[in-house]
Amino acid sequence: MKKYWLLIWAVVVATSGCLKGQDDPVFPSPDLTIPEDESITLQSALPFPIGAAVNNNLIRTRAPYRDVVIKELNSLTAENAMKFSQLHPAENTYTWTEADFLVEFARQNNKRVHGHTLIWYKNPPSWALNYQGDAAAWDRLLKNHVQTVVNHFKGKVVSWDVVNEAIAENGTLRDCIWLQKLGPEYISKSFIYAHEADPNALLFYNDYGHEYGPTKRNGILKLVNDLKAQGVPIHGIGLQMHTRYNMSNNNIADAINTAAATGLKVHIAEVEISMNPDNIQDLTYSAGLAAQQKAKYEFLVRTYNAIPKNQQFGITTWNVGDSDSWIRGEYNRPDWPLPFDDNYHRKAAYQGILDGVK
Ligand code: XIL
């Protein structure tokens, strides 16, 4: 009889991994957390705004996630809720519920909201992709979308990524529906329309890859400098900074400093530091990796903190903790790219961010 119970116990233990809930992390990190000093938070320690891309479902359902967002951050970006497809799924339909939820959560908790994103090659819904009309009709479509959205959030969303990822890897304008239908002016038009709808909103051009090297970066800088020279209302440049632990410090510094040299506000808008850029399926997070990640976050923050204060719009991480990072799903690999671990405890990377302003 005793043996029988032992067997049942053994089976339960052995299979408990299969009984995990769907919210459980797929790639749990080992406990590499740092001691939590309750008197310190990112938002109180940093001399510029600190934020994250957030997901409404996690705010609603995952208490430790919501608690970290409320406690640590003072700026929020909607991970998806303000994109074209989400807000404007049919020509005459706007769906505000999710984005409004986030804006109200931010208001209640005294957080700034950065709007992301009005025009992005990846996100037009099928009705827009299939839209039939001449250039004037496409211009109206663009204007209606931009102005309806900016107007809806006027006074609640302080800033917008007006155009996202318009430059290709070779530094030229990326082919997309907007370029095909409206020509290169789709970019300046988007800024002008957004500015008409909310003259107080800070308007950003947002892209990734500034730290890859000069080819793409020069294309981005030329675009924003041309917009400035034409008198287009552009106030900031967003460096997504989806980067990796082995990206060179020189490249990161060049990305930040050349952006600052435009004179525009600089937003590190979507940062994460991937620890598994080579997609190693059985990689595990280790103290050694954690230390490298800490050093990279520290360097990034130190460099950013050195640009002129009035250009520091803030730093935003893309997602909050490792278990909600889009990287795991996007690349189907274990990764630990954020300052909080799977359970929303502070990692060494968190300390690196704090050390970057010391
Ligand atoms: C990503 C979201 O994180 C995913 O949930 C979604 O499926 C695709 O978009 N650059 C951007 C962000 O500007 O909008 C992207 O967000 C990540 C890359």
Image: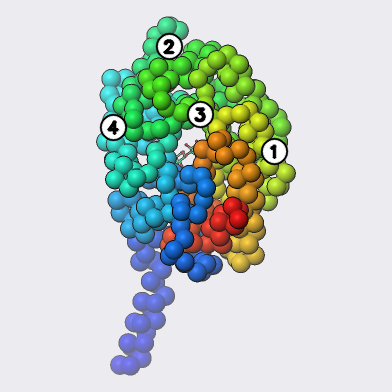
Closer to viewer: mark 3 or mark 4: 3
Marks 3 and 4, how far apart in space?
A: 22 Å
Q: Residue at point 72% right, 44% down?
A: 250
Q: Is residue 237 left or right of residue 192?
A: right
Q: Up-down: is 105 above or below 182?
A: below
Q: Specify which label sits upstream in the sequence, 3 or 4.
A: 4
Q: On residue 204, which mark appears?
A: 3
Q: Up-down: is 23 above or below 223?
A: below
Amino acid type, callout 2: Asp
> Where in the figure is residue 275, as x and y percent of width and height?
60, 54
Q: Residue at point 37% right, 59% down?
A: 64
> Which element type, helix, strand or loop, lies under badge 1?
helix
Closer to viewer: mark 4 or mark 1: 1
Q: What residue does disc 4 label?
A: 96
Q: Specify which label sits upstream in the sequence, 4 or 1.
A: 4
Marks 4 and 2, how far apart in space?
A: 23 Å
Q: Up-down: is 218 above or below 313?
A: above
Amino acid type, callout 3: Phe
The quarter of the rendered structure image containing the C terminus is: bottom right
- The front one of 106 and 128 is 106
- The front one of 80 and 311 is 311
Q: On residue 254, which mark appears?
A: 1
Q: Specify which label sits upstream in the sequence, 3 or 2.
A: 2
Q: Is residue 201 left or right of residue 211?
A: left
Amino acid type, callout 4: Trp
Q: On residue 156, which mark appears?
A: none
Q: Specify which label sits upstream in the sequence, 1 or 2.
A: 2
Amino acid type, callout 1: Asp
Disc 2 crowd, CA 10 A, few/some/many (<14, 14-19, 20+): some
Q: On residue 139, which mark appears?
A: 2
> Which element type, helix, strand or loop, lies under badge 2?
helix
